[in-house]
Image (cartoon, rainbow, N blue to C red):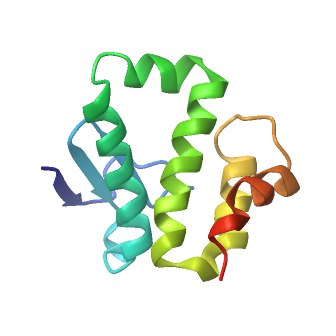
Amino acid sequence: MARVVYSDFLLPAWADGRTLGPIVQIRPSARNDAGLLAHELDHVRQWREAPIRFYPRYLFSRRWRLRYEVEAFRAQLRLDPAALDTCSALLATKYRLGISFRDALNLLEDFAP
């Protein structure tokens, strides 16, 4: 079970959502974005599978952060396949992963329409 909160409070300017353990924070302007909610709920699933290891892995391991974000973006694309370019751009630029747009697209394109 997750708790979803709609608030701009302390969200980075570039983000419409984030997950802190079982709590999902979504910007009110993105309230109706089912793909974003699926993305964040996938992070809740990841956290539940390894609650002690999730955040250290996410914060300090580029390999794990990439794995977690690719899984979450794939969950998002299942609901909104038209967001492939947007998701690829975010994956390539917002998570300190050192990958190109093309790399991100290759990781996510199996979920395109």
Q: Position of residue 14 (x, y in %)?
A: 57, 55
Q: How many marks?
A: 0
Residue at the location (34% across, 58% down)? Answer: 8
44 sits left or right of 3 in the view = right
The image quarter in which residue 26 lies: bottom left
Residue at the location (31% across, 33% down)? Answer: 47
100 sits left or right of 21 in the view = right
Q: Nearer the viewer, residue 85 or 108?
A: 108
The C terminus sits in image quarter:
bottom right
Q: Position of residue 103 (x, y in %)?
A: 83, 50
Residue at the location (51% across, 78% down)? Answer: 80
Residue at the location (86% across, 48% down)? Answer: 100
**For residue 97, above or below residue 78:** above
Q: Position of residue 106 (x, y in %)?
A: 79, 57
73 sits left or right of 91 in the view = left
Q: Position of residue 33 (x, y in %)?
A: 39, 76
Q: Nearer the viewer, residue 51 or 24?
A: 51
Q: Nearer the viewer, residue 36 or 68?
A: 68
